Image: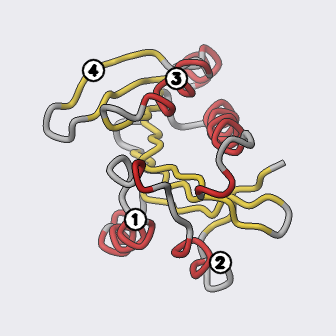
């Protein structure tokens, strides 16, 4: 069972060392780039990086963007290290985000996107209940959304 741990001085080196297969690198920015963006946006207090941990092992990275004004939660980036792929960690991570969203008292919409060609991510999101929304030409990304009736009812 995975845990989502905030990035701190104990795990950031392990997160930076995570890697993808060569053919996947065009789909997700390097984790060091994502952490640098978190630093740039720190004053907004809406970007949250997490280490995906199984037991004592860091297996991936997750970056959530919480827009309190628009009431949107977004899976901005997610990656599982190449040596841990195919073991269900991506699915467990998205499921953990969905649970967090369902228990959230503010956000009414959960958004995820994936770069065109990353059909593994698209299939995973759709399989877990995300619905196609749009295509963003600027970023070459498909945008999907997940709406929980519970979230809609609790936040009216």
Q: CA distance from mark 3 to mark 1?
A: 22 Å
Among numbered discs 1 and 2, the one appearing first in the sequence = 2
**Which residue is at a point 51% across and 75% down the rendered structure image?**
16
- N-terminal of the two: label 3 or label 2? 2
On screen, 148 above or below 100?
above
Task: Give the number of callouts.
Answer: 4
Sooner in the amino-acid sequence: mark 4 or mark 3: 3
Q: Position of residue 130 (x, y in %)?
A: 51, 20
Mark 3 vs 1, N-terminal side:
1
Seen from this angle, which residue lies furthest bottom? 9
**Given this view, does label 1 or label 2 mark the residue nearer the observer?**
1
**Disc 3 designates what residue?**
123
Which secondary structure lies at badge 1? Answer: loop
Q: Residues within 10 Å of mark 2 (few under 14, many from 20)?
A: some
How far is mark 4 from mark 3, CA to CA?
15 Å
Q: CA distance from mark 1 to mark 4?
A: 25 Å
Q: Residue at x 52, y 23 (%)?
A: 123
Q: Nearer the viewer, residue 40 or 19?
A: 19
Between 93 and 29, the residue placed more toward the observer is 29
C-alpha span from label 1 to label 2: 16 Å
Q: What kind of colouring is applied to the model shown?
A: secondary structure
Labels 1 & 2 near each other (Cβ < 8 A): no
Residue corresponding to mark 1: 30
Quarter location, residue 86: top right
Residue 11's mark? Answer: 2
Give the residue number, with chain letter if any, for mark 4: 134
Decide: is 81 above or below 10: above
């Amino acid at each position: 069972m995975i845990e989502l741990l905030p990035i701190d001085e104990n795990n950031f080196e392990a997160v930076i060392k995570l890697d993808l297969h060569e053919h996947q690198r065009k789909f997700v920015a390097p984790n060091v780039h994502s952490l640098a963006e978190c630093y740039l946006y720190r004053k907004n207090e809406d970007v949250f990086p997490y280490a995906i941990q199984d037991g004592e092992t860091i297996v991936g990275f997750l970056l959530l963007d919480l827009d309190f004004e628009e009431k949107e939660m977004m899976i901005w980036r997610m990656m599982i290290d190449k040596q841990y792929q195919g073991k269900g960690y991506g699915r467990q991570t998205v499921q953990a985000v969905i649970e967090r969203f369902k228990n959230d008292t503010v956000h009414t919409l959960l958004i995820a996107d994936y770069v065109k060609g990353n059909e593994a991510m698209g299939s995973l999101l759709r399989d877990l209940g995300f619905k196609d929304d749009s295509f963003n030409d600027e970023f070459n990304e498909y945008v999907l959304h997940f709406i929980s009736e519970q979230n809609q009812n609790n936040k009216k």
